[in-house]
Image (spheres, rainbow, N blue to C red):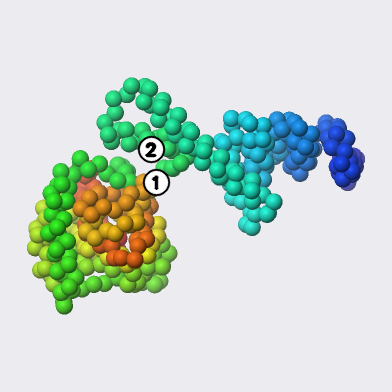
């Protein structure tokens, strides 16, 4: 050990003895002197911060923690201590500081002595996020901007992203990614003039679903049917499970005649949709049946060239659906169009069955020439992809 390190160690030991004797003032004096040696140790600066706080100087303690964080900027303990110090001083930046700490990996298990601090951190961070969201919403309102409903929704999401209540999600298809397509978790209903006609047919489509489900020749199959060796861990829990099943009307471009025969109005409507026609991949249309108390885990679909439409037919309370950061409750007869290549999940939290109609359509940004190119390329790829 060199003389510099030896001197520093001697001073730290002396400070520890002073603290053990209850003399905080002396301990702080010793460590303040040692700080002149500019110790390259996060442990030293944490110790000095603790003594400064014990001596009633929380903002000086923050200065010491900042020295520690200069050496280890992403240290969870340092960031949490900094936030706690700001909080104890009533500083307005405490909430944001807690958020920075909570964004870092934390030890597992967490030391029991930090449990209450972590609990407060989560509360203060949530309060800060809500305060920031309200502040930004007020700023937009005060600007006098004449926003349409969809523009206002984007402004609200903008504020939510800034406050880090939500984050940006992007299209991440497992197989086919056509460049440059607009990304949206849920697409604007106004872009699909047929959606009200679809919703108006809900009673008829439900009746047809019940007819085919009760037919002796109905083909009810697991929704997810990948080979066990397929490297798609997102489906392991539900692969070949009867908790999530489907009655296919159109499967990977082929009409399932036995099922479709029971559903003339549904098939008539699908015939008017602009569905992709790609052998082995699309179009797809099915009744999706989710068993009680079943969770469909976060996952993404195969290709961004298509969007999916849901029409809820049997939806008990507490059935929700999340795409990206947008979580919505299913409502019978209320359809939506979403991008399934953005992370999404669903859960039936009830003791009853949930049933929806699902079908795919071309992404509206694609030109006829692009559609033809996609059909050719995906068909040529000749790889078995699911209807997911």
Question: 169 or 77: nearer the eye?
Answer: 77
Question: Which of the marked residues, 1 or 2, is nearer the chain's N terminus?
Answer: 2
* Side of 387 where 138 appears, left or right: right
- Height in image: 8 above or below 294? above
Q: Position of residue 99 (x, y in %)?
A: 56, 40
Q: Are marks 1 and 2 in contact (CB under 8 Å)?
A: yes
Q: Residue at x 25, y 49 (%)?
A: 337
Q: Secondary structure at mark 2?
A: helix
Q: Position of residue 303 (x, y in %)?
A: 30, 54
The CA span between labels 1 and 2 is: 9 Å
Confirm whether residue 173 shows in the render.
no
Q: Residue at x 11, y 68 (%)?
A: 262
Q: Which mark is residue 75?
A: none
Quadrant where the image shows the C terminus: bottom left
Q: Position of residue 146 (x, y in %)?
A: 29, 25
> Which residue in the structure is indicated by mark 1?
325
Question: 40 or 258: nearer the eye?
Answer: 258
Q: Secondary structure at mark 1?
A: loop
- Height in image: 323 above or below 250? above
**Circle 1 crowding by C-alpha within 10 Å: few under 14, some 14–19, many from 20:** some
Q: Residue at x 41, y 42 (%)?
A: 168
């Amino acid at each position: 050990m060199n003389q510099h390190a030896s001197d520093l160690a001697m001073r730290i030991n002396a400070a520890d003895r002073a603290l053990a004797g209850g003399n905080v003032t002396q301990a702080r004096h010793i460590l303040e002197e040692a700080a002149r040696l500019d110790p390259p140790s996060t442990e030293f600066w944490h110790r000095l911060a603790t003594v400064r706080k014990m001596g009633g100087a929380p903002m000086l303690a923050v200065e010491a923690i900042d020295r520690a964080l200069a050496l280890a900027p992403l240290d969870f303990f340092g960031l949490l201590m900094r936030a706690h110090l700001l909080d104890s001083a009533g500083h307005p930046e405490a909430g944001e500081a807690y958020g920075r700490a909570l964004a870092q990996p934390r030890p597992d298990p967490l030391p029991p002595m930090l449990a209450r601090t972590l609990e407060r951190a989560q509360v203060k961070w949530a309060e800060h996020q809500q305060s920031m969201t309200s502040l930004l919403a007020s700023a937009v309102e005060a600007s006098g901007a004449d926003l349409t409903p969809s523009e206002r929704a984007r402004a609200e999401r903008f504020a939510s992203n800034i406050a880090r209540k939500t984050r940006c999600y992007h299209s991440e298809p497992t197989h086919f990614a056509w460049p440059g397509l607009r990304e949206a978790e849920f697409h604007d209903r106004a872009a699909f003039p047929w959606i009200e006609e679809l919703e108006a047919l809900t009673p008829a489509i439900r009746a047809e679903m019940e007819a085919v489900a009760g037919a002796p020749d109905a083909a009810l199959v697991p929704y997810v049917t990948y080979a066990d060796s397929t490297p798609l861990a997102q489906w392991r829990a539900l692969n070949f499970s009867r908790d999530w099943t489907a009655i296919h009307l159109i499967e990977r471009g082929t009409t399932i005649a036995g099922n479709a025969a029971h559903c003339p109005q549904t098939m008539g409507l699908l015939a008017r949709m602009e569905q992709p026609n790609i052998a082995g991949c699309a179009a797809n249309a099915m009744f999706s049946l989710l068993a009680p108390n079943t969770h469909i885990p976060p996952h993404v679909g195969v290709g961004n060239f298509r969007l999916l439409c849901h029409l809820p037919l049997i939806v008990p309370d507490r059935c929700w659906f999340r795409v990206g950061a947008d979580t919505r409750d299913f409502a019978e007869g209320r359809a939506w169009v979403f991008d399934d290549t953005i992370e999404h999940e669903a859960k039936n939290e009830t003791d009853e069955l949930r049933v929806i109609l699902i079908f795919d359509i071309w992404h509206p940004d694609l030109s006829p020439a692009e559609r033809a190119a996609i059909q050719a390329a995906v068909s040529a790829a000749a790889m078995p992809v699911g209807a997911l």
